[in-house]
Structures are given as structure tokens and as C-alpha cells.
């Protein structure tokens, strides 16, 4: 419970599409490892008012847990059902629930999908909203298309 998590920002650069991870504990900038683009960022007391990468004002919270591990746990439980007469399901469900309760939350930007790990999240950051995400997905695709061919003008 009292574990200290390093503050990190994981993003896909809007200009070069390179995925990059930045430990931002004592830094005041985020750097793309592909094109070397820099964004100003002050991690101390960051309030999630706007995203430092895309300037979006909307974030959602999710568990900082690899979903593939959760699926693997349930897959093993299902495979074992014939030999355990279904008793593997509640057992592995309990393991999955325990891990879920222990894993901290992270914030994700709706527009650029930047992941902010190790930060104190405010209550105003709600869980994922599918309707809101759909609108941002359309905007994100338009923005990526614009960045990928800056000499072309949108039609």
C-alpha cells in the first residue's frame, strides 16, 4: 500500500509515431526518443488540467495492469474446469480480484493516449467513457493524418 511508484509518461509521438517512455520524477520536459521533440512538463503537483503532449483537457483512469495477464489468469481457470469441476473459476477469480485491488490507477489522455503512471489522481478523473472516447478517436485520427503529411492541406 505504501509503495512508491516512479512517475512515468508513456506516449506515441504525434509527429514520428515513435512510442517512448519518460521517467519524469525530476525533469521538466518529456522527450520523444524518435524525433527528439520536447514538451514542457512539471511533474511536481501536476493537476491533469491539460495534457502536456496534445493539450487535451480530458483524461480517464484505469488500472495500471497488463490486461493480457488478467486474460491469461482466466484462460488458465477455464482450461482447468474439466479437471477441477469448476472450482478453478472462483479460485482464479479471487487471484485476479486480489491483483486488481492491489494495482494502482493511472491516467490516460483521451486524445493522444498518453499514459501517466505514478501520479496522485484527483477524483475528477473518472473511468473510461465509451461515448467520449469515440469522439476523441475521430479527432485523433484526423490529427495523426495531419501530422503524418504536414505539407498536405486537409480537404
Image: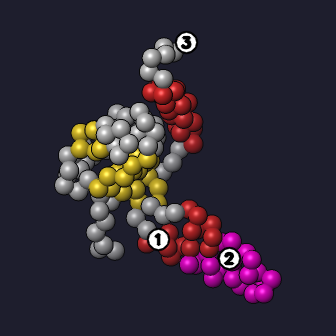
> Residue at the location (45% across, 17% down)?
151
Instruction: Say which of 95 and 29 sits in front.
Output: 29
Instruction: Say which of 27 and 50 sits in front.
Output: 27
Of callouts 3 and 2, the N-terminal one: 2
> Residue at the location (56% across, 62% down)?
67
Instruction: Say which of 91 and 32 sits in front.
Output: 32
Q: Is residue 77 visible?
A: yes
Disc on res. 155? 3
Report the magenta stretch's main SS.
helix
Q: Which residue is mark 1?
A: 101
Task: Tell whether label 1 touches label 3 (CB within 8 Å).
Answer: no
Q: Position of residue 63 (x, y in %)?
A: 46, 60
Of callouts 2 and 1, the N-terminal one: 2
Q: Which residue is mark 2?
A: 76
Q: Position of residue 130 (x, y in %)?
A: 57, 42
Of callouts 3 and 1, the N-terminal one: 1
**What is the CA distance from the residue labelled 3 to the residue labelled 1?**
48 Å
Label 1 environment density (alpha carbons within 10 Å; few <14, some 14–19, many ≥20): few
**What is the CA distance from the residue labelled 2 to the residue labelled 1?**
20 Å
Q: Is residue 112 visible?
A: no
Q: Is residue 2 above or below residue 6?
A: below
What secondary structure is marked by label 1? helix
Which dot, 2 or 1, sits closer to the camera?
2
The N terminus is located in which quarter? bottom left
In the image, which residues are magenta?
74-95
The quadrant where residue 137 appears: top right
Magenta residue check for 40: no
Disc on res. 14? none
Q: Position of residue 81 (x, y in %)?
A: 76, 81
Label 3 environment density (alpha carbons within 10 Å; few <14, some 14–19, many ≥20): few
Amino acid at each position: 500500500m505504501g509503495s512508491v511508484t516512479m512517475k512515468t509518461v508513456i506516449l506515441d509521438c504525434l509527429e514520428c509515431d515513435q512510442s517512448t517512455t519518460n521517467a519524469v520524477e525530476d525533469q521538466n520536459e518529456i522527450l520523444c526518443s524518435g524525433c527528439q521533440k520536447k514538451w514542457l512538463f512539471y511533474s511536481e503537483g501536476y493537476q491533469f488540467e491539460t495534457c502536456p503532449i496534445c493539450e487535451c483537457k480530458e483524461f480517464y483512469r484505469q488500472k495500471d495492469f497488463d490486461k493480457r495477464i488478467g486474460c491469461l489468469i482466466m484462460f488458465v481457470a477455464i482450461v482447468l474446469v474439466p479437471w477441477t469441476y469448476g472450482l478453478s473459476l472462483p479460485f482464479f477469480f479471487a487471484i485476479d480480484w486480489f491483483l486488481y485491488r492491489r494495482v494502482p490507477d493511472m491516467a490516460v489522455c483521451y486524445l493522444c493516449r498518453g499514459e501517466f503512471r505514478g501520479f496522485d489522481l484527483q477524483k475528477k478523473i473518472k473511468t473510461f467513457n465509451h461515448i467520449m472516447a469515440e469522439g476523441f478517436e475521430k479527432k485523433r485520427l484526423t490529427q495523426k493524418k495531419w501530422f503524418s503529411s504536414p505539407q498536405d492541406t486537409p480537404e
